[in-house]
C-alpha cells in the first residue's frame, strides 16, 4: 500500500499512526449525508412542484422514478470506474456532478430543466456510495469495519428519516428552491475538504471496458427499475404492457449481462463474489430487510392516514422515533459486530422482526397509535442489528481485488430492491382492497373502505412475516467471515487449476 507516493509497511492505512483517517471520514460522510438526504428531501414537495410548473402527478413522479432509474443504470458501472480512477478523482468527480445537478435544480426556470438537474444529481449519488464503501474497506481492517460501516449506516438511515420533516419546514418557510440551495454550501464544503485531505487508497488497474456489458446492464437494471416503478401509475397493474414488457426486457438484459461477465477476463461486475458463502448470505439478508423495511415505510403511513384518520404530519412524527433510533444504533451494532460477530446480533433481531411483522398483521381501526410507534421502533432496531452486520460480514470475506465488485453489487441491488419492494407491496394491498370492495354489498360506505384498507394491510404484513421467517432461518446459518483464510484457499485453488 502506498501513501502519498511513499511505501508503507502496513496492510491497512488505518493501522499506520502517520495516516490521518478522520479528515477522510469527515469528507466522505458529509458528502454521503447530503446526497442521500436529497433522495427523500423532494418527496413532500411534489404537490408544490405540480402547482408551480402546471404538471400532472405522473409527470412530477419522474422526479422520484427518474432518480431511481439513473441510479440503477450508473451503479453497475461503479466497479469499473473504481479501477479506472483514483479514490480522490472519483469522489471529487461524483460530488462535483451532484453539486452541478443540485445547482441546476435550484435555478431551474421550468420542469424539464428541473428534471434534468435531478437526473444529474442521481448520477452523482449513485456512484458515491460504492466509492465510500470501497474506501473504508481498503482503509480499515476487518475487525474494525463493523463500527466504521455502522457510521455509514447512521448516515444511510438518518438522512432519509429527517428528509420529509426537514423538507416540510423548508418548503413552508423558504420555498421549494431552497431544498436545493441549502444543500449547495455543504456539498461545496465536502468537495473542498476532500480536495485538501483525501488521498488515493486504491490501485488503478484500468481493465478493458466491455461496452456490450454496459449496454446489457443499462437495459437490464434500468428496465427492471422502470417497470416496477411504473406499476403504481397504471390501473391494470402487472397486466399493463408498460409494466410487464419492461420487466421482461429487464430480466433478459440482466440474464445476458450475467452470461457475459463469466466470459470476460476482466468483467465489469465480477459475479464470482457469489462463490463466497457469507457474501451471498449477506446479499440475501440485505434483500429481505429492504423488502420488510419498505413494507413498513410505505404501508404504515397509508394505514395511519386511512383507517386511523391521522394527518400526514402526525403519521410522519409517529415513525420518526424508529427512524432516528435506527440511525443512532447503527454504529453501536457495528461495534457489537466487531466484538461478538454476526450471530449474537442477527439471530435475536430476526426473531424480533418476524414477531413484529406478525403483530402488525393484526392491525385494525382501533389500534392505538403507541402500537404503531413501538412496532416501528422494533422493526428499525431489528434492521440496524441485521443489515449492516450482514453487509459487513459478507464484504469481509472477499479478497481485496473483489471489493469494488462486492460494493457495486450491493449498491446496485438497493434501488432495484427498493423499486420492487414498493411496487409489489402496494400492488398486493390494492388487489386485496379491491377484492374486499367487490365482495361487499356497500362498497362506497366509509366503514367498508376502511375495512378494505385494513384487509390489504393485514395481507401485506402477513406476507412480510413469511419473508422474515426466511431471515430467521438464514440468521442461524451465519458465521463470522475469515477473509484471509478464504483468500488463501481461493489462491491455492487457482494455483492447482
Image: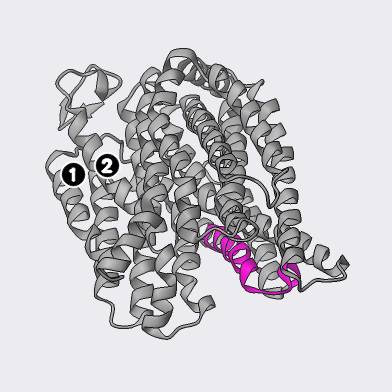
Color theme of the render: one colour
- Asked whether residue 16 appears in the rendered view, the answer is yes
Q: Residue 460: x percent and y percent?
A: 71, 50
- For the point 49% across and 60% down, which residue is it? 312
Q: Residue 327: x percent and y percent?
A: 40, 37
Instruction: Reply above or below: 134 against 169.
Output: above
Which residue is disc 1 drawn over? 194
**Between marks 2 and 1, how big is the CA–CA gap?**
8 Å
Task: Answer with left or right where residue 210 lies relative to residue 167.
Answer: right
Which residue is disc 2 drawn over? 28
Find numbered disc 1 in the image and state the secondary structure of the residue it sits on: helix
User: Between residues 16 and 208, which one lies in front from this camera angle?
Assistant: 16
Q: Earlier in the sequence, mark 2 or mark 1?
A: 2
User: Between residues 405 and 98, which one lies in front from this camera angle?
Assistant: 98
- Asked whether residue 137 appears in the rendered view, the answer is no
Instruction: Reply above or below: 108 against 381.
Output: below
Task: Answer with left or right where residue 11 lies relative to residue 280.
Answer: left
The kind of secondary structure the magenta stretch mainly shows is helix
Instruction: Reply above or below: 42 against 58.
Output: above
- For the point 74% across and 39% down, which residue is it? 466
Neighbourhood count class around disc 1 (C-alpha, 10 Å): few under 14, some 14–19, many 20 upward: many
Q: Residue 236: x percent and y percent?
A: 74, 73
Quadrant, the C terminus:
top right
Quadrant for residue 51, please give it: bottom left
User: Where does the magenta region start and end?
Assistant: 217-239
Are circles 2 and 1 on residues that touch, CB within 8 Å?
A: yes
Quadrant for residue 48, please give it: bottom left
Neighbourhood count class around disc 2 (C-alpha, 10 Å): few under 14, some 14–19, many 20 upward: many
Q: Residue furthest bottom?
A: 54
Amino acid at each position: 500500500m502506498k501513501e502519498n507516493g511513499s511505501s508503507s509497511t502496513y496492510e491497512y492505512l488505518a493501522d499506520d499512526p502517520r495516516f490521518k483517517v478522520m479528515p477522510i471520514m469527515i469528507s466522505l460522510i458529509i458528502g454521503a449525508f447530503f446526497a442521500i438526504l436529497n433522495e427523500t428531501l423532494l418527496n413532500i414537495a411534489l404537490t408544490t412542484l405540480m402547482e408551480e410548473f402546471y404538471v400532472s402527478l405522473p409527470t412530477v413522479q419522474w422526479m422520484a422514478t427518474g432518480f431511481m432509474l439513473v441510479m440503477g443504470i450508473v451503479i453497475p458501472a461503479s466497479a469499473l470506474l473504481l479501477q479506472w480512477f483514483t479514490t480522490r478523482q472519483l469522489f471529487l468527480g461524483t460530488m462535483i456532478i451532484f453539486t452541478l445537478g443540485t445547482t441546476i435544480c435550484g435555478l431551474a426556470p421550468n420542469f424539464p430543466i428541473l428534471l434534468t438537474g435531478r437526473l444529474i444529481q442521481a448520477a452523482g449519488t449513485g456512484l458515491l456510495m460504492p466509492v465510500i464503501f470501497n474506501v473504508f474497506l481498503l482503509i480499515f481492517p476487518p475487525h474494525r469495519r463493523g463500527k466504521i460501516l455502522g457510521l455509514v449506516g447512521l448516515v444511510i438511515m438518518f438522512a432519509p428519516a429527517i428528509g420529509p420533516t426537514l423538507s416540510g419546514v423548508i418548503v413552508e418557510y423558504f420555498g421549494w428552491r431552497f431544498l436545493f440551495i441549502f444543500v449547495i454550501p455543504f456539498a461545496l464544503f465536502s468537495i473542498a475538504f476532500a480536495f485538501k485531505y483525501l488521498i488515493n487508497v486504491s490501485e488503478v488497474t484500468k481493465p478493458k471496458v466491455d461496452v456490450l456489458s454496459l449496454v446489457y446492464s443499462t437495459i437490464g437494471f434500468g428496465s427492471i427499475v422502470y417497470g416496477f416503478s411504473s406499476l403504481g401509475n397504471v390501473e391494470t397493474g402487472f397486466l399493463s404492457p408498460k409494466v410487464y414488457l419492461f420487466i421482461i426486457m429487464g430480466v433478459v438484459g440482466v440474464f445476458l449481462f450475467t452470461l457475459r461477465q463469466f466470459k470476460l477476463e476482466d468483467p465489469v461486475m465480477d459475479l464470482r463474489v457469489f462463490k463466497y458463502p457469507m457474501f451471498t448470505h449477506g446479499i440475501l439478508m440485505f434483500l429481505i430487510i429492504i423488502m420488510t423495511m419498505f413494507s413498513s415505510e410505505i404501508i404504515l403511513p397509508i394505514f395511519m392516514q386511512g383507517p386511523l384518520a391521522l394527518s400526514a404530519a402526525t403519521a410522519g412524527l409517529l415513525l420518526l422515533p424508529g427512524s432516528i433510533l435506527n440511525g443512532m444504533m447503527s454504529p453501536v451494532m457495528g461495534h457489537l459486530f466487531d466484538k461478538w460477530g454476526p450471530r449474537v446480533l442477527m439471530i435475536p433481531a430476526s426473531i424480533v422482526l418476524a414477531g413484529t411483522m406478525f403483530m402488525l398483521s393484526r392491525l385494525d381501526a382501533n389500534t392505538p397509535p403507541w402500537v404503531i410507534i413501538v412496532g416501528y421502533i422494533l422493526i428499525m432496531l431489528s434492521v440496524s442489528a441485521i443489515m449492516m452486520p450482514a453487509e459487513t460480514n459478507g464484504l469481509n470475506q472477499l479478497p481485496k481485488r473483489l471489493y469494488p465488485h462486492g460494493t457495486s453489487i450491493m449498491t446496485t441491488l438497493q434501488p432495484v430492491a427498493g423499486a420492487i419492494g414498493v411496487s409489489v407491496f402496494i400492488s398486493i394491498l390494492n388487489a386485496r382492497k379491491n377484492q374486499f370492495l367487490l365482495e361487499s354489498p356497500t362498497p362506497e360506505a366509509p366503514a367498508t373502505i376502511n375495512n378494505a384498507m385494513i384487509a390489504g394491510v393485514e395481507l401485506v404484513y402477513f406476507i412480510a412475516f413469511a419473508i422474515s421467517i426466511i431471515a430467521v432461518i438464514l440468521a442461524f446459518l451465519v458465521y463470522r467471515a475469515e477473509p484471509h483464510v478464504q483468500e488463501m484457499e481461493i489462491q491455492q485453488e487457482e494455483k492447482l487449476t
